[in-house]
Image: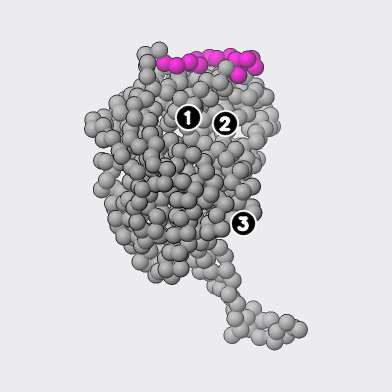
């Protein structure tokens, strides 16, 4: 049971950045953060300059040898302390996260704050099983290169170096923790760059890391409303890797800019998830999965099943159930425990979602339910849970909307369903619902995406996470996260 968040987050006046172990005023002053549910100010965040970003990268570079050379047990002990400290501050962090992101009390209390602590705890475990692998000796003949003998080898995972961690606005704490924790565990230093819309909780996260004792320069903070500081990090010769979560458009620019210095890239980008529902499926379960596009952070999640690809025999039934489900979801104040659908992050994002709905109408989609702003809410960046029916050729079916909008498309047979699901420039997370689990697995293996949920929308957090096609490059999650923030080094010697 989720309790109401009765204590409003106090106004935050954050004007300082953490660079090289010192908190100092941002070069550009500060900028305002707005509560998307009320349109009132939450506070101000530091406005970093390009010079601040470059100084943060240089500080991380200077701290790298010492941190990479720190015993793994000592690094991991600090990770465990960070997890404890985040949990101890949950009561303070939760109202702040809700105020600046618009997350509902249910999402904030279950999926925002505690998961950030869980990720630091996960990466406080031993890393040696990932960091080193030995190979059986080989007998090598003499060659013009070297004398023969018995050759042994180790594969070591070394820190990549300085990692710029740049995150999206939907899950600011969780996304940042998912980057910073494995990066630090593997001996990297980091520059933290949260999304411009809601950086305040991430500032608190960095303060926690500073207070638990991470050495100066190991964790550095840059926040800004403008893109230039982030671009400076991507271009900086002091930065070895960019870990980015956000839009495909920005991700492609990062890939292009990072190529000039051969940066390692971990890019978790957009998605347009298909949920294939076969005629033998548990329709109620499939409806709940698809409906999570509305109920889970108002569709502002890249793994959302925003395309309902439904076999024709149950198409009308699924559409009817979805329409009914959409109309019973409470849209409103995120601090109320029974609110299911909160606001979008900004007026700009609301306008973007509304433009997509309008384009759907223009291209012939039927708006089954929703499509506008909730009549009972005069303030806040809200959009009604919206269901459209149409074809896979429509813009609303092909492009990521990042809002509470589902498009339902019918198919006749298995081959057509697979083809429709794969007919997308994205490939992050798809879903298959069928009582025939052998068929569901067969279909899942044909889908061109990084993840397939079979009769569930649940995640397995040790499984690799990442996308195909325009949904990104690389994988994290579990031990894959440790591998992502490391470089392989081979050491060979004669026995």
Q: Secondary structure at mark 3?
A: helix
Q: Position of residue 465 (x, y in %)?
A: 52, 47
Q: Which mark is residue 261?
A: 3
236 or 324, nearer to the observer: 236
Q: Is residue 358 above or below residue 468?
A: above
Q: Would you say residue 321 is visible in this rendering?
A: no
Q: Which segment is the magenta one? A: 359-374
Relative side of 197 to 307, left or right: left
In the rendered view, how is the structure colored? one colour
| Magenta-colored stretch includes residue 462 | no
Q: Residue at x 49, y 26 (%)?
A: 348
Q: Secondary structure at mark 2?
A: loop
CA distance separating discs 2 and 1: 10 Å
Q: Are marks 3 and 1 in contact (CB under 8 Å)?
A: no
Q: Residue visible at 23% across and 32% down? A: 7
Q: Earlier in the sequence, mark 2 or mark 1?
A: 1
Dot 3, how many residues are within 10 Å of its Cα: few (below 14), some (14-19), or many (20+)? Answer: some
User: Seen in the image, is 73 located left or right of residue 324?
Assistant: left
Q: Which residue is mark 1?
A: 299
Q: Label 2: which residue?
A: 400
- On the image, which quarter does residue 250 sit in? top right
Residue 387 position (above or below residue 87): above
Quarter of the picture containing the N terminus is: top left
Q: First in sequence, mark 3 or 2: give its number.
A: 3
Left or right of residue 364: residue 199: left
In this rendering, the answer to whether 180 lies above or below 284 is below
In the figure, 236 relative to 377: above or below? below
Residue drawn at (35%, 37%) of the image: 44
In the image, what residue occupies the spot 56% across and 26% down?
308
Place of residue 226 in the rendered image (x, y in percent of width and height, measured from the top left): 49, 39
Closer-to-camera residue (409/160): 160
Residue neighbourhood size for the residue with mark 2, other residues' Cα within 10 Å, grouped as few (<14), some (14–19), many (≥20): many
């Amino acid at each position: 049971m989720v309790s109401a968040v009765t204590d409003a987050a106090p106004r935050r006046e954050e004007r300082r950045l953490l660079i090289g172990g010192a908190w100092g005023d941002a070069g550009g002053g500060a900028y305002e953060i707005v509560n998307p549910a009320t349109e009132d100010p939450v506070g101000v965040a530091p406005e970093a300059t390009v010079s601040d970003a470059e100084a943060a990268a240089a500080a991380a570079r200077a701290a790298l040898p010492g941190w990479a050379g720190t015993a793994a047990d000592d690094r991991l002990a600090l990770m465990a302390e960070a997890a404890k400290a985040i949990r101890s501050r949950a009561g303070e962090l939760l109202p702040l996260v809700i105020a600046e992101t618009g997350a509902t009390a249910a999402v904030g209390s279950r999926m925002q704050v505690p998961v950030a602590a869980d990720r630091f705890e996960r990466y406080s475990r031993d890393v040696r099983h990932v960091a080193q692998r030995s190979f059986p000796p080989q007998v090598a003949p003499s060659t013009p290169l070297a004398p023969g003998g018995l050759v042994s080898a180790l594969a070591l995972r070394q820190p990549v170096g300085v990692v710029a961690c740049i995150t999206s606005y939907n899950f600011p704490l969780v996304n940042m923790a998912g980057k910073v924790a494995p990066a630090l565990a593997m001996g990297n230093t980091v520059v933290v760059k949260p999304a411009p819309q809601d950086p305040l909780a991430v500032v608190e996260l960095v303060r926690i890391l500073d207070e638990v004792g991470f050495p100066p320069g190991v964790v550095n903070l840059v926040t800004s409303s403008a893109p230039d500081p982030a671009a400076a990090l991507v271009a900086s010769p002091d930065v070895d890797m960019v870990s980015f979560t956000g839009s495909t458009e920005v991700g492609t620019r990062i890939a292009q800019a990072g190529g000039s210095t051969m940066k390692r890239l971990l890019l978790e980008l957009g998605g347009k998830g298909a949920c294939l529902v076969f005629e033998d499926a548990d329709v109620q379960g499939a409806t709940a999965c698809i409906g999570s596009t509305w109920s889970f952070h108002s569709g502002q999640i890249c793994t959302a099943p925003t395309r309902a690809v439904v076999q024709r025999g149950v198409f009308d039934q699924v559409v009817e159930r979805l329409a009914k489900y959409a109309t019973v979801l409470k849209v409103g104040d995120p601090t109320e425990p029974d609110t299911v659908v909160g606001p979008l992050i900004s007026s700009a994002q609301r306008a973007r979602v509304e433009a997509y709905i309008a384009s759907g109408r223009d291209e012939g989609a039927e708006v089954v339910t929703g499509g506008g702003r909730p009549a009972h809410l005069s303030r806040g960046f809200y959009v009604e849970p919206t269901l459209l029916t149409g074809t896979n050729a429509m813009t609303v079916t092909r492009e990521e909307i990042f809002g509470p909008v589902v498009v339902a498309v019918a198919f006749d047979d298995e081959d057509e369903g697979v083809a429709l699901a794969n007919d997308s420039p994205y490939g992050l997370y798809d879903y298959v619902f069928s009582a025939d689990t052998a068929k569901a697995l067969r279909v899942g293996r044909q889908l061109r995406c990084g993840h397939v949920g079979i009769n569930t929308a649940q995640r397995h957090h040790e499984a690799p996470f990442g996308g195909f096609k325009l949904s990104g490059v690389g994988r994290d999650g579990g031990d894959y996260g440790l591998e992502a923030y490391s470089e392989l080094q081979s050491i060979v010697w004669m026995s």
